[in-house]
């Protein structure tokens, strides 16, 4: 929580206003208080605030009008409504219009601190996400970066910084974490974006063939070389060469690659002419190169040449909060058939997905969702639609909670019951964020509130916009 945040309090009740100011100042915030909505709007025109707390019912201008004015002039600023118990319906209506949260009178100090902390954290994360996603305007719409967890925000920051330069980049991470996707993002956001992006998987080719592929060869250089062929370093001229699984290349090829990186020039196999290079190198590995260096399996000098900027991609088990967003993304990609629409996942199904360890990471998750789309026949995906290993991951938790999953003894839940449970699960997984929940559900916020009202769910305590 940022102790130097600027907070505006608009409250016409002097006692309530003083209580809020005292509580917030004790937390170290810069607090300004006004006694009416008109003055709050005017201060908003003059000063940038990180958070606004406004009463709904004020004598001159209502909190609804304050909300509307700030949403127009400062849409990133979260607005918290202050409401008496009798005006709770008005608070919910205002939240539908874009308020972040509400505080019910009489206030409790701990409740005020919690709502303020949540509001400011939300604002910080939204702004960081917007900033780095804008910098990473990934041009490959088929596989955009997905995730808003703290580990992924750190990746976005590094990619945004390194994309503008030309330094060699080393991507480390387990298989399936998206290293080639990140390499694409660096290339797509660099000055080389209009030039070739050339990927090659080093472990997929024998040493002799890989050398020829990378450096090219002249006619007659070896049996079958019936003509000259430029290498991938030349093909990537002006652009980016991506060497995946760099930790698997042989010691002999390591020596040759080091020389190319040092001299920024290459000689084709069987040739003598020197060819100057102009390509950026991004290398990736699912092995820890520093450990390979210590074990004598990878050249230390080559490691230092590659390790100019290192980005480590987190495994999916370390960013489980991104799983609902990833699942929604892959579902949108694969569930477009009008004859077989999938609306979402049963809560127990999402629990299984989040409990599973995902040794294959995001790539494995994508494959599982593709399988689910192909085999599921209902509007909601059931645990029984998942592969055995994934389904078993949630069995103990479900049994402990007595969830009554479909397929167990007892009556099957109705579709309406499954929809309610799914809505509850989405709200839980998003921390009550209404904007993110509506996105995952594929509906607008007004529909989200109507669903909540139909099921008797209170969205007021959530941390949504």
Image (cartoon, helix red, strand yellow):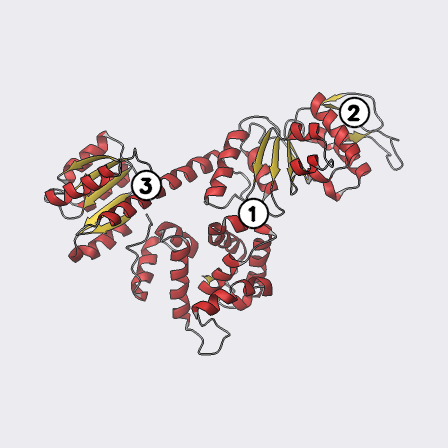
Q: Nearer the viewer, mark 2 or mark 1?
A: 1
Looking at the picture, tell me which residue is in the foreground, 87 or 285: 285
> Which residue is pictured at 48% across the width and 69% down the height?
399
Disc assigned to residue 267:
2
- 354 in relation to 82, above or below: below
| Badge 3 element | helix
Question: Which is more N-terminal, label 3 or label 2?
Answer: 3
Q: Is residue 345 visible?
A: yes
Disc assigned to residue 315:
1
Looking at the picture, tell me which residue is in the foreground, 154 or 77: 154
Whether residue 304 sits left or right of residue 75 in the image: it is right
Q: How far apart are marks 3 and 1 (CA)?
A: 28 Å
Please rate how many residues cluster around mark 2, counting C-alpha atoms within 10 Å: few if below 14, some from 14 to 19, many from 20: some
Q: Give the mark count.
A: 3
Whether residue 309 sits left or right of residue 33 in the image: it is right
Question: Which is more N-terminal, label 1 or label 3?
Answer: 3
| Badge 2 element | loop
Q: Distance between the residues labelled 2 and 3?
A: 57 Å
Q: Where is residue 159 in the image (x, y as percent from the top left)?
A: 53, 34
Whether residue 285 sits left or right of residue 424 in the image: it is right
Residue on which disc 3 sits: 120
């Amino acid at each position: 929580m940022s102790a130097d945040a600027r907070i505006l309090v608009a409250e016409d009740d002097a006692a309530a206003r003083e209580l809020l100011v005292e509580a917030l100042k004790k937390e170290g915030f810069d607090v300004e208080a006004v006694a009416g909505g008109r003055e709050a709007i005017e201060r908003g025109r003059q000063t940038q605030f990180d958070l606004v707390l406004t009463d709904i019912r004020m004598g001159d201008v209502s909190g609804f009008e304050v909300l509307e004015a700030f949403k127009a002039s400062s849409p990133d600023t979260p607005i918290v409504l202050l409401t008496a118990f009798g005006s709770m319906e008005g608070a919910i209506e205002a939240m539908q219009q874009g308020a972040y949260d509400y505080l019910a009178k009489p206030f409790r100090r701990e409740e005020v601190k919690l709502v303020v902390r949540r509001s400011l954290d939300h604002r910080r994360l939204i702004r960081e996400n917007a900033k780095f996603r804008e910098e990473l305007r990934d041009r490959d719409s088929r596989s955009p970066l997905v995730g808003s967890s703290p580990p992924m925000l750190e990746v976005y920051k590094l990619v945004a910084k390194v994309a503008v330069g030309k330094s060699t980049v080393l991507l480390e991470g387990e298989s399936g974490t998206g290293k080639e996707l990140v390499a694409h993002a660096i290339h797509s956001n660099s000055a080389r974006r209009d030039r070739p992006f050339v990927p090659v998987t080093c472990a997929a080719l024998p040493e002799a063939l890989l050398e020829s592929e990378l450096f090219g060869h002249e006619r007659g250089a070896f049996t079958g070389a019936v003509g000259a062929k430029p290498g991938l370093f030349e093909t990537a001229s002006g652009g980016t060469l991506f060497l995946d699984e760099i930790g698997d290349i042989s010691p002999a090829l390591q020596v040759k690659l080091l020389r190319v990186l040092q001299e920024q020039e290459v000689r084709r196999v069987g040739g003598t002419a020197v060819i100057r290079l102009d390509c950026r190198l991004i290398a990736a590995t699912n092995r820890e190169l520093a450990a390979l260096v210590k074990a004598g399996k990878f050249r230390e000098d080559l490691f230092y040449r590659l390790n100019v900027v290192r980005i480590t991609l987190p495994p999916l088990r370390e960013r489980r909060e991104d799983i609902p967003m990833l699942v929604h993304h892959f579902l949108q990609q694969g569930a477009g058939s009008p004859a077989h629409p999938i609306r979402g996942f049963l809560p127990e199904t999402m629990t299984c997905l989040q409990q599973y360890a995902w040794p294959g990471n995001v790539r494995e998750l994508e494959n599982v969702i593709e399988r689910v789309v192909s085999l599921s026949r209902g509007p909601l995906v059931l645990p029984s639609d998942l592969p055995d290993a994934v389904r078993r991951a949630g069995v103990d938790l479900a049994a402990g909670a007595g969830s009554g999953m479909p397929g167990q003894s007892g009556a099957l839940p109705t579709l309406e019951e499954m929809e309610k449970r799914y809505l509850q699960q989405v709200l839980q997984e998003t921390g009550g964020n209404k904007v993110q929940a509506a996105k995952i559900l594929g509906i607008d916020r007004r529909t989200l509130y109507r669903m909540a009202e139909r099921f008797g769910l209170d969205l007021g305590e959530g941390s949504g916009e």
